[in-house]
Image (cartoon, grey):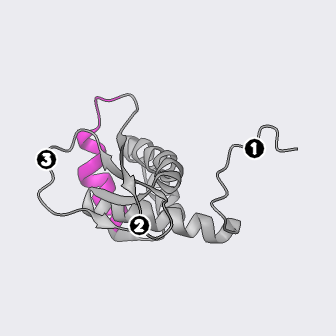
Amino acid sequence: MRHLKRTAKLGRTGIHRNAMLANLVCSLIEHKRVITTLAKAKAARSVAEKMVTLGKSGTLHDRRLAVARLHQEGAVKVLFNEIAPSQKERRGGYTRIIRMNQRQGDAAQRAILEWVDLGAVTETPAET
């Protein structure tokens, strides 16, 4: 029985899933929006929002926790210097998921994962 087990498995081992979600969140931080499947977007949303919560306090310990989770120091710098200060007044809900059409090859539901209050994005979203 899977009672109280909320983790989306996504058909991967735990190590692979954590690495994939970390890379997806780093792409979100770098490009401000990503196109992915709906299941991955829902799983990455919680990781991204927890990282913003760490960035809002901005202590050295929180920065080290973020680097340990994301494994990319450049993305953590952008998170702590640009994204977290812009979300300072919000109490949660930093990301939004916009559903798109189905993918042609396997009919997987696609979605856009993006930040809520970062304004208009001029570049094209990164597709993962």
Task: Say whether residue 93 is left or right of residue 2.
Answer: left
Q: Residue 88's x, y, as percent?
A: 29, 35
* Identity, as a three-letter code, of the amino acid under mark 1: Lys
Task: Say whether residue 102 is left or right of residue 118.
Answer: right
First in residue order: circle 3 vs circle 1: 1
Disc 3, disc 1: CB below 8 Å?
no
**Dominant secondary structure, magenta:** helix
Task: Please report the bounds of the magenta region as a residue range.
Answer: 75-90
Disc 2, disc 1: CB below 8 Å?
no
Q: Is residue 100 above or below residue 105?
A: above
Quarter-of-image position of residue 63: bottom left
Residue with the mark numbered 3: 120
Q: Is residue 76 above or below residue 51?
A: below
Residue with the mark numbered 1: 5
Q: Is residue 67 above or below residue 45?
A: below
Q: What residue do we see at 35% from left, 60% from top? A: 35
Task: Say whether residue 86 is left or right of residue 127.
Answer: left
Q: What residue do we see at 47% from left, 51% from top? A: 38
Residue 104, numbered label: 2
* Identity, as a three-letter code, of the amino acid under mark 2: Gln
First in residue order: circle 2 vs circle 1: 1
How many other residues sit within 10 Å of disc 1, few (<14), some (14-19) or many (≥20)? few
Q: What residue do we see at 51% from left, 67% from top? A: 106
